[in-house]
Image (spheres, helix red, strand yellow):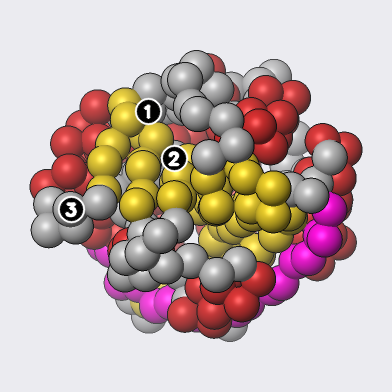
């Protein structure tokens, strides 16, 4: 079942937690983007699904004109406040696939952990039409995986997910697939179906450590977790917090960050 329509707006209900808990992206990722496409004060850029702006400021620092397309009204207002000192920044509130955008106008369109909400058959052709010849689409995301350093905690959390999350969504236990380089390669090839060339992809890695309380705050920013019935979600989160506290009070998250780049001929 495709939950995008049901879940796509849930982020907007957790704006402050999202802004606090969701991570940004590593400097090396932006280095690869800017090595691939030159962006400066003469450039025209669009960000798809800006959220609370985790990926926005490094691009704004180039001096470009940046338009954020953000579905959530609360996020849109946060973005306007957060980046009010950048005179060439603006926000359009709406779904990317629905808003009208100029064609053959932009040097870069980028999307950070957001483009999966846009239907492929609408999103890629739209990005292609918006870009100038030689313009670039940069799609990137953060893919977290927990408890690699504590197999017992990982196993216990898996069991808690099986009894709550998996049961709620009807997901078969043991079917979750972690992100791999093969997945990044597959994503990178999608733009070729829509006329893009010069395909490239990169992977980056980092670790983050959370207390039990912090980790629960992080889970509370995930759309599919927010959407769980409150009584079930409260018990679900409480059991995870208890498990982490019984295993030393900290949990390590291993992030894989993938970047896919493609160019309009």
Front in this rendered view, residue 227 or 162 = 227
Magenta span: helix, strand or loop, mainly? strand
What residue do we see at 54% from left, 79% from top? 31
Label 3–label 2 contact, CB within 8 A: no
In this rendering, the answer to whether 246 lies above or below 66 is below
In this rendering, the answer to whether 1 lies above or below 28 is above
**Mark 2 Cα shell of 10 Å, populated few (<14), some (14-19), many (≥20):** many
Mark 3 vs mark 1, foreground winner is: 3
> Helix or strand or loop: what does disc 1 sit on?
loop
Q: Quadrant of residue 40?
A: bottom left
Is 90 one of the magenta-colored residues?
no
Res. 245 in view: no
Res. 66 in view: yes
The answer to which of marks 2 and 1 sits earlier in the sequence is 2
Mark 3 vs mark 2, foreground winner is: 3
Is 205 one of the magenta-colored residues?
yes
Q: Residue 245: give x, y in percent of width and height.
A: 34, 70
Residue bearing the label numbered 3: 87
The answer to which of marks 3 and 1 sits earlier in the sequence is 1
Q: Is residue 20 left or right of residue 134?
A: left
Residue bearing the label numbered 2: 49
Magenta residues (range):
197-214
Residue bearing the label numbered 1: 71
Front in this rendered view, residue 169 or 59 = 59
Instruction: Assign the N terminus to one quadrant of the image.
Output: top right
What residue do we see at 60% from left, 37% from top? 104
What residue do we see at 73% from left, 42% from top? 173
Give the distance between the C-alpha atoms of the residues marked 3 and 1, in whole angstroms. Answer: 22 Å
Q: Residue 206: give x, y in percent of width and height.
A: 53, 80
Q: Is residue 230 left or right of residue 254?
A: left
């Amino acid at each position: 079942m495709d939950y995008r329509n049901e879940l796509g707006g849930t982020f907007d209900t957790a704006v402050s937690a999202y802004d606090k808990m969701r991570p940004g992206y590593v400097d090396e990722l932006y280095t690869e983007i800017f090595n691939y496409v030159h962006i400066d004060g003469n450039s025209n850029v669009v960000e798809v699904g800006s959220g609370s702006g985790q990926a926005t400021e490094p691009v704004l620092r180039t001096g470009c004109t940046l338009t954020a397309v953000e579905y959530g009204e609360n996020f849109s207002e946060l973005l306007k406040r957060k980046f009010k000192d950048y005179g060439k920044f603006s926000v359009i509130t709406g779904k990317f696939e629905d808003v009208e955008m100029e064609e053959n106008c932009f040097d870069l369109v980028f999307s950070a952990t957001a483009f999966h909400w846009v239907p492929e058959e609408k999103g890629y052709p739209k990005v292609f039409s918006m870009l100038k010849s030689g313009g670039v689409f940069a799609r990137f995301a953060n893919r977290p995986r927990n408890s690699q350093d504590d197999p017992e905690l990982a196993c216990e959390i898996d069991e808690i997910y099986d009894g709550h999350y998996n049961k709620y969504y009807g997901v078969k236990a043991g079917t979750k697939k972690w992100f791999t380089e093969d997945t990044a390669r597959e994503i990178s090839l999608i733009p070729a179906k829509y006329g893009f060339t010069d395909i490239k992809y990169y992977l980056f890695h980092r670790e983050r450590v959370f207390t039990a309380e912090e980790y629960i705050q992080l889970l509370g920013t995930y759309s599919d977790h927010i959407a769980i019935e409150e009584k079930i979600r409260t018990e679900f989160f409480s059991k995870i917090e208890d498990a982490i506290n019984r295993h030393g009070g900290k949990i390590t998250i291993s992030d894989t960050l993938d970047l896919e780049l493609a160019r309009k001929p």
